[in-house]
């Protein structure tokens, strides 16, 4: 009997979304392949330990040959391009690298699909687009028809990848969809991002390991959801008969000061002002305006809705960081004994 098990290739499998998506696809009985870069990737052991069912393939979004090889080996039904230089602040410091990986990387992968799939239309493609495309926003809330005005090298590179995806869909008939995702967070969020910076610092302050938390603009507002909910939306996009672009968002925004209120309250601190400093070095050269998504198309067409609300998300992240920091503290106390 023919093997009907679906196959998926994920770039960015070592990232926050890559891990949640891998779990979701595994639950759905996919054979999951993950592109992993570098000679000695520090996250490889996490994947090997916790996701032994993922087949890791060496490759890099800057290396076309490795993308072709990964597609040839995995023969995926679905390709999820989550790999990127994804941190806005870094993109200002390394704009060329960001353009190469976040922008051109998508083109290389689309071109590799065109070559390896050879017009058979077997390989569906998901592009990780972003609310940062809206930047200097033209309307609020933002939907799939709102014009883009990115305000960072990251946003500009994502704009290139977004329109290249639309172009490959229209030019070559590839089933290629873009998810314009608003911020989504989790206990797996990188420490460089503001939510995780806050929750891990709050845990460390509570445990007496850190005295203060230095942030940029605490009045910035974001539409924050839970990453586990958002990967479900990515998968749903690729199950549609026709490819299309969708906004995934909660439709509610919160200022960073509310993130501080909720996070510090979790550890019993009601007045966080003595612990928080603002430093212009953490402000962006060009700030985005109020990002607030309208996810009604995803709700109507994909039946997708975010489940986890912001207070629950913050609770989950602080609890996780208290556990991690507590273990580190115990480890260093034991090693010092
Ligand atoms: P993330 O945690 O920062 O993960 C980024 C991934 O990209 C990592 O696995 C990283 O691998 C990989 N990567 C970096 N350079 C690469 C290269 N040269 N070749 C191949 N892979 C490379 O990001 P995330 O939060 O999971 O987000 C997933 C995607 O969605 C990203 O494209 C991001 O820009 C986009 N997005 C995220 C959000 C959000 O709020 N999280 C919102 C909108 C869009 P290493 O571990 O080896 O560095």
Image: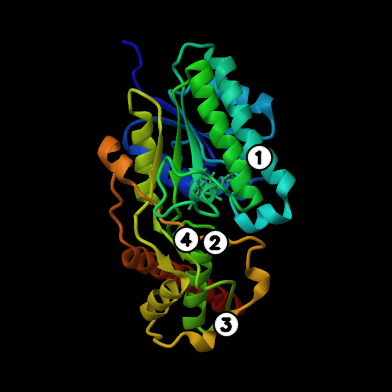
Mark 1 CB within 8 Å of ligand 1: yes
Between discs 1 and 3, the one toward the N terminus: 1
Q: Which residue is mark 3?
A: 212
Q: Which mark is residue 222?
A: none
Seen in the picture, residue 288 relative to 259 is either above or below; the reply is: above
Between discs 2 and 3, the one toward the N terminus: 2
Instruction: Evaluate whether residue 254 shows in this view.
Output: yes
Q: Which mark is residue 101?
A: 1
- For mark 2, does the 10 Å Cα neighbourhood hold few (<14), some (14 to 19), or many (20 or more) residues? some
Provide residue 5's location: percent of width, then percent of height.
35, 23
User: Splitting the image into 4 quarters, where does residue 1 fall?
Assistant: top left
User: Splitting the image into 4 quarters, where does residue 317 fall?
Assistant: bottom left
Instruction: Evaluate whether residue 74 shows in this view.
Output: no
**Left or right of 62, for residue 235:** left
Marks 2 and 4, how far apart at CA: 18 Å
Q: Which mark is residue 290?
A: 4
Marks 1 and 2, how far apart at CA: 19 Å
Name the secondary structure under disc 1. Answer: helix
Marks 1 and 3, how far apart at CA: 34 Å
| Tag 1 and tag 2, C-beta contact below 8 Å | no
Provide residue 99's location: percent of width, then percent of height.
68, 41
Seen in the picture, residue 117 relative to 184 is either above or below; the reply is: above
Which residue is more in the foreground, 255 or 234? 255
């Amino acid at each position: 009997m023919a093997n009907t098990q679906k196959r998926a290739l994920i770039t960015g499998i070592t990232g926050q979304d890559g891990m949640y998506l891998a779990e979701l696809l595994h639950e759905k009985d996919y054979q999951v392949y993950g592109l992993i870069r570098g000679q000695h990737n520090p996250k490889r052991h996490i994947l090997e330990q916790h996701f032994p069912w993922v087949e890791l393939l060496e490759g890099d979004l800057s290396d076309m040959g490795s993308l072709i090889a990964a597609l040839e080996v995995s023969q995926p039904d679905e390709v999820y391009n989550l790999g990127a230089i994804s941190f806005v602040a870094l993109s200002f410091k390394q704009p060329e690298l960001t353009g190469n990986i976040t922008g051109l990387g998508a083109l290389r992968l689309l071109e590799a699909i065109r070559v390896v799939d050879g017009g058979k239309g077997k390989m569906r493609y998901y592009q990780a687009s972003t609310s940062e495309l809206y930047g200097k926003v033209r309307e609020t809330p933002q939907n799939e028809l709102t014009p883009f005005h990115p305000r960072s090298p990251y946003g500009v590179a994502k704009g290139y990848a977004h329109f290249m995806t639309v172009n490959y869909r229209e030019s070559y008939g590839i089933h290629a969809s873009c998810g314009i995702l608003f911020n989504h967070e989790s206990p797996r969020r990188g420490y460089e991002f503001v939510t995780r910076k806050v929750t891990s610092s709050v845990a460390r302050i509570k445990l007496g390991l850190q005295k203060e938390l230095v942030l940029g603009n605490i009045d910035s507002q974001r539409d924050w959801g839970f990453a586990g909910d958002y990967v479900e939306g990515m998968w749903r996009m690729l199950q549609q008969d026709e490819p299309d672009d969708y906004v995934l968002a909660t439709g509610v925004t919160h200022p960073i000061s509310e993130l501080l209120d909720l996070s510090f309250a979790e550890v019993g601190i009601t007045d966080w002002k003595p612990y928080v400093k603002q430093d212009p070095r953490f402000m962006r050269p060009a700030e985005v305006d109020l990002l607030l998504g309208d996810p009604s198309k995803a709700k109507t067409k994909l039946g997708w809705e975010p489940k986890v609300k912001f207070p629950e998300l913050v609770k989950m992240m602080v609890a996780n960081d208290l556990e991690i920091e507590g273990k580190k503290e115990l480890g260093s106390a034991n090693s010092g004994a």
